[in-house]
């Protein structure tokens, strides 16, 4: 076969170094703390099996057909009610909801709709690395502000926004609950400050909230969207963490005009979101299966978080530091005197894998950090994984 | 609420005029021949209901979880075998298959991977209007060549290719079977010529083949991919037409290196294709449900095509012309002395909707054409729809 200029083959999106590392997760005997998978034991399989069979049998004519780019009307209505009842987000009727293939597709299609070469997007640092890859893919300059224990440094954020020309400021992207990767949750004052900045400098805010309903300390935090008096916030969430990610149902909630415009981009991508999954989620909301499942998820993950916390403390003592997360799936740990990127291949050899923290920084990476997942591994894997990490990170005797 | 510069809201993709027209499809009493929906009576609901329940119940741990960006391995393997057994496409192992959210997402992510501002893409004229919108979205210049009764004018295609600088020639996009909208199927000689052009001018070919297995005359045409000695063809297909579109499972088959690079873009869009649907399709292939369903689809649509053919002949006589399609869901009719774009609102008033053909042309639109769908409407709707069209298109007496 004749070669076709190999540069043509190069995707715009590459993080091959990271990919090469993550590929080791599949090695036999490997304990992977690098991923971000839910524990399959929290999937309500029996109920979902019954619902899927029923939905196809009784509504298959519609549930197996193409559907509207904005989403199945009944599901949009039930998501609207769910946000109001469970999250305190009012005033977002069905017209304010766009259903997408996971909330990832919301993020992608909003970015594609709004971003032009040279636009500025303001993010947390570190942040969700797939998000900043998407922003850059559409030509945006990513302007990060450091994370503090209670969320993004909003004074640094304001300075970054102020330093950009008004026409170049596009949106602020934040994860107020269990930020990925740090696990930090945002304080009320910072939330108010972000909305003030958005108002003063005429910006939109993308609030990415996969974990809003999962809380290990009992108190459910208020989403930014529930405090959004000017309609500047686009709220993203998903059923991936509270029901099952394989169904790939997420959504964006916000200004109907904007979302209808985003739905035209979404249509170019995949015409419409999986209709069967939309019917399944709609029925699961109606039966309150999702609402009931949240308790199960919280209980399972709180236990796992605590096991990992104990293992880290007993293995590393004060050579490790982190904020114990109130929600989410990760502990973002700082290992004193360790370069986690340099050590990752040695960890692989020792049968444990983590996400080197530097890959989650937009700039000024902290090489002593690692993102450790506690939702997927079992109790034994968590303790053995951290034990292996202890051996790898031990200061070597001369 | 303060307005946020309304230009920010404008998506890159708009065909609002067309959208406005298609919105009338939902009007009570409207007979829509404008869409492209399968007949839900061909969905094998009972079997799919049983399969979905079983897949979740017995494999829910994996079927409800995140999955690989390239697709579920077992499904990729079965698609590989399906292409070999049913389509005569050999040599495409599981590594050559990328599973996507409908074949639309294959088209989108391949375009995003390969196209750069100013690249030339060579298409049929008219063509699938969502495809050329996607190409333009990524900055490509679309170079159309006219359709003949047996497919694209390959001499015009070659001239267009030759006229472009080598570095600017990106790919040829064709639908060899039941081309959308014309319904034409490509002759063997043209297929060979396209592969020669691709080889001579060092181009890739995207072969979009949703209907390859649906054939009303009995003979299954050979896909371009099965004649592709140099690995230049990326073959796209889907289970939307032979099983159910609501499952949103399509795929691309071709060079593994290219597809692995495309999968990185796909990952930015939606992380992975719906896992549950992949398990359902995999099981449906294994039980030969899809293979068996093709016969049902062919029989139902052949009948409907013939009803529409008879209705058009008896209503319009020789004032209408078209190639009776051997496959697919549309008759692309030319109505003598009619401007279908101008008449569409009058048609709406008379309770019938069609797709004005001009919207499917990249250039040099033929305003006398309309795309008429026969797969979705029932027998009575087909005849009544064409009768209404007859009244609307009747040459008005002075």
Image (cartoon, coloured by chain):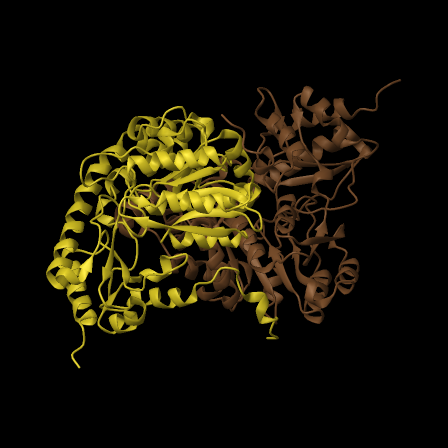
Chain colours: A brown, B yellow
Name the spot of residue B353 as percent of width and height, x first: 26, 65
Q: Is residue B227 above or below residue A292?
A: above
Report the residue at 44% width, 45% height from top.
B159
Is A377 displayed left or right of B147 in the figure? Answer: right
Between residue A57 and residue A316, name the one nearer to us.
A57
Between residue B218 and residue A185, name the one nearer to us.
B218
Between residue B118 and residue B129, name the one nearer to us.
B118
State the image quarter where residue B35 is shown.
Answer: bottom left
Q: Tell me if I can see residue B98 in this picture.
A: no
Name the spot of residue A325 as percent of width and height, x first: 68, 45
Name the spot of residue B385 as percent of width and height, x first: 18, 63
Between residue A34 and residue A2, name the one nearer to us.
A2
User: Farthest residue toward the right?
Assistant: A398
Q: Is residue B264 above or below residue A64?
A: above
User: Farthest residue toward the top?
Assistant: A398
Is A311 displayed left or right of A213 in the figure? Answer: right
State the image quarter where residue A196 is shown.
Answer: bottom right
Report the residue at 47% width, 34% height from top.
B200
Is B325 displayed left or right of A224 in the figure? Answer: left
Name the spot of residue A254 as percent of width and height, x first: 54, 64
Report the residue at 84% width, 21% height from top.
A396
């Amino acid at each position: 076969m004749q070669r076709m200029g190999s540069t043509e083959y190069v995707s715009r999106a590459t993080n091959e170094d990271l990919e090469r590392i993550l590929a080791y997760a599949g090695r036999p005997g490997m304990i992977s703390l690098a991923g971000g998978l839910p524990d399959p034991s929290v999937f309500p399989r029996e109920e979902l099996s019954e619902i899927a069979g029923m939905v196809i049998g009784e509504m298959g004519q519609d549930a197996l057909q193409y559907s509207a780019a904005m989403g199945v009307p009944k599901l949009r209505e039930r998501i609207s009610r769910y946000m109001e009842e469970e999250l305190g987000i009012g005033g977002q009727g069905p017209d304010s909801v766009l259903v997408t293939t996971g909330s990832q597709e919301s993020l992608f299609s909003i970015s594609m709709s709004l971003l032009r070469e040279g636009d500025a997007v303001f993010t947390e640092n570190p942040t969700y690395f797939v998000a900043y890859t998407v922003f850059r893919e559409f030509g945006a300059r990513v302007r990060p502000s450091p994370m503090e224990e209670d969320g993004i440094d909003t004074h640094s954020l304001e300075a970054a926004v102020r330093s950009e020309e008004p026409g170049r400021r596009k949106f602020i992207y934040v994860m107020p609950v269990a930020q990925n990767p740090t696990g930090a949750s945002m304080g009320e004052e910072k939330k108010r400050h972000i909305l003030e900045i958005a108002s003063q400098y005429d910006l939109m805010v993308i609030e990415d909230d996969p974990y809003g309903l999962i809380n290990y300390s009992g108190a459910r935090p208020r989403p930014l969207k529930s405090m959004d008096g000017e309609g500047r916030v686009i709220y993203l969430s998903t059923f991936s963490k509270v029901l099952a990610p394989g169904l790939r149902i997420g959504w964006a909630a916000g200004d109907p005009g904007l979302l209808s415009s985003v739905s035209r981009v979404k249509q170019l991508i995949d015409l419409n979101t999986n209709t069967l999954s939309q019917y399944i989620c709609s029925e699961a909301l109606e039966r309150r299966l999702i609402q009931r499942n949240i308790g199960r998820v919280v209980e399972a993950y709180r236990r796992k978080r605590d096991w990992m916390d104990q293992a880290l403390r007993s293995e590393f003592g004060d050579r490790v530091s982190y904020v114990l997360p109130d929600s989410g799936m990760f502990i973002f740990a700082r290992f004193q005197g360790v370069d986690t990127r340099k050590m990752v291949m040695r960890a692989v050899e020792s049968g444990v894998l983590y996400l080197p923290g530097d890959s989650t920084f937009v700039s000024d990476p902290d090489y002593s950090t690692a993102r450790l997942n506690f939702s997927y591994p079992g109790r034994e894997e968590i303790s053995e994984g951290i034990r292996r990490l202890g051996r790898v990170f031990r200061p070597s005797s001369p």
